[in-house]
Image: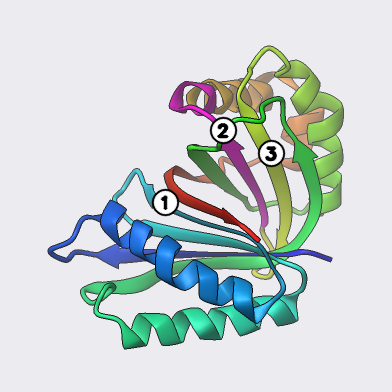
Amino acid sequence: MAYYMVRLYSGATDRSPEQLCQQAGSELAPQLIQAGGLQRYLTGVADDGRIVSASVYDSKAAAQKGLEIARQWVANTDAMRGYQLSQTMQGEIVRVMQGNTQNRATFGVGRLHTTKATAERIADAIEQHGIPAAQSIQGRARTLVVQLEDGRVGTFLAFDSQEARDQHNQNVRKQRAELAPIRQVMPNEPEEINVRIVTSTVA
């Protein structure tokens, strides 16, 4: 089963977050691909200024190998000096839902749900009720539903524009308020992380 890994770094340096993302995309991504097991690697900047990296691997073992390569890259380069790891999330991907655009994903959102429902139940509810109710929103590239190792369920979505992402965010809040099947599996307000994607590498 594919495995998802997200890292968020906070801090500051004399280089912009976008420049640091570009450096990771050009220097680190090829190393991760060469090591094997990587499917996709993204870098981006969260709305709160943190630097984000997100990786899809073939397996947890491949993800752990990639994580060690990333740690060595951070240790051996001055690029991330002044930044520190502030948040991590990882787990098995239980569902991938392809969207309605083939354009490059430029914006993303991650939602971390504290719920008693499994990731499979949440994925079923989104497919049966959430996506049909949101068909009018164009620009969604894909949705990942992840059973996080900390017990929460993460939904991670990518879009081809900020407008599409923001429309989706509004729609999700409306669905939780109006659709009982959605509210049942996602009863609490999730932690929401909005990101502008800077680099995207597909192995």
How far apart marks 1 and 3 lie (CA) works out to 17 Å
User: Hey, what amino acid is under mark 1?
Assistant: Gly
**Mark 2, residue position:** 159
Residue 68 image point, x, y percent: 54, 86
Q: Residues within 10 Å of mark 1 (few under 14, many from 20)?
A: many
How far apart marks 2 and 1 lie (CA) works out to 13 Å
Residue at image location 63% in from the left, 17% down from the top = 137
The quadrant in which the C terminus is found is bottom right
Residue found at the far top of this picture:
136
Residue 72 image point, x, y percent: 43, 87
Q: Residues within 10 Å of mark 2 (few under 14, many from 20)?
A: many
Q: Is residue 149 magenta?
A: no
The quadrant in which the N terminus is found is bottom right
Residue 167 image point, x, y percent: 53, 20
- Judged from the image, the secondary structure of the residue bearing numbered disc 1 is strand
Question: Counting residues from the N terminus, which is met first, the one under dot 1 or under dot 3?
Answer: 1
Q: What stretch of residues is rendered in magenta?
A: 153-165
Foreground residue among 143 and 103 = 103
**Mark 3, residue position:** 142
Residue found at the far left of this picture:
14
Residue at image location 45% in from the left, 66% down from the top = 87
Q: Which mark is residue 44?
A: 1
User: Hey, what amino acid is under mark 2?
Assistant: Phe
Position of 130 with respect to 157 (left or right) is right
